[in-house]
Image (tube, grey):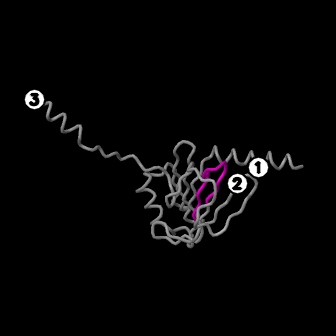
Amino acid sequence: MKALIIAIAALSSVPVFSEEPEAFSIKNYTVGTAMESCPPETVRQIKRGVKLSCFLPATTYAGAEVKDMLLTLYDNEVISVMAFFARKGRNENIDVKNALTLKFGKAYQEKPHINQYYWQKGDLSLLFDGWGGVLMLTDSKKSEAAKLKDAEAKQSDM
């Protein structure tokens, strides 16, 4: 009996590794992160209605050159993150797709013939479009709320 208790105690202290994919992010930016203004590294910002667009400097993602990154803020939080790749095409940025699969798991929808892959978790969507050279993370409900608020603001201006 004493050996059984020791074995149970030993097993309960062993860390359990989950194969659960990570939360969606692009360059450590996640949708829903509180942010009142653009990050310090912002190259330029544009206020569009109720949304604030923050353009970030060129970088890389999974070894691919990113010419522009865009964060969209609404109601003091990030509602979308986009990366625009320097190279685009039917067979471009496959390393990016492979890195996304390793990080977030298998895409729920794959269109390899046009180099597009989609991941979904609740209201969060991650789209990789290698042909168009875009990686986009967005929250559908928050994006829709921002659109409605923009429409209301424009309506009241008339």
Could you tell me how far apart the alpha carbons at marks 1 and 2 are, in whole angstroms?
A: 8 Å
Mark 1 neighbour class, 10 Å CA radius: few under 14, some 14 to 19, many 20 or more: some
Q: Amino acid at mark 2?
A: Lys
Residue at x 18%, y 33% (from the top left corner): 8
Residue 134 in which image quadrant: bottom right
Q: Secondary structure at mark 2?
A: strand
Residue at the spot of label 3: 2
Up the image or down, 107 lies above or below 16; here it is below
Magenta part, dominant SS = strand
Give 122 or 5, whichever is nearer the viewer. Answer: 5
N-terminal of the pair, mark 3 or mark 2, is: 3
Could you tell me how far apart the alpha carbons at marks 3 and 2 are, in whole angstroms?
A: 63 Å
Q: Amino acid at mark 1?
A: Asp
| 7 within the magenta span | no
Check the image and name the residue furthest to the right: 158
Q: Name the spot of residue 88 as percent of width and height, x first.
A: 57, 70
The span picked out in magenta is 71-83
Mark 3 neighbour class, 10 Å CA radius: few under 14, some 14 to 19, many 20 or more: few
Q: Name the spot of residue 128 as percent of width and height, x first.
A: 54, 59
Q: Are marks 1 and 2 in contact (CB under 8 Å)?
A: yes
Q: Which mark is residue 150?
A: 1
Q: Which mark is residue 51?
A: 2
Q: Name the spot of residue 117 as percent of width and height, x first.
A: 52, 56
Give 113 or 16, whichever is nearer the viewer. Answer: 16
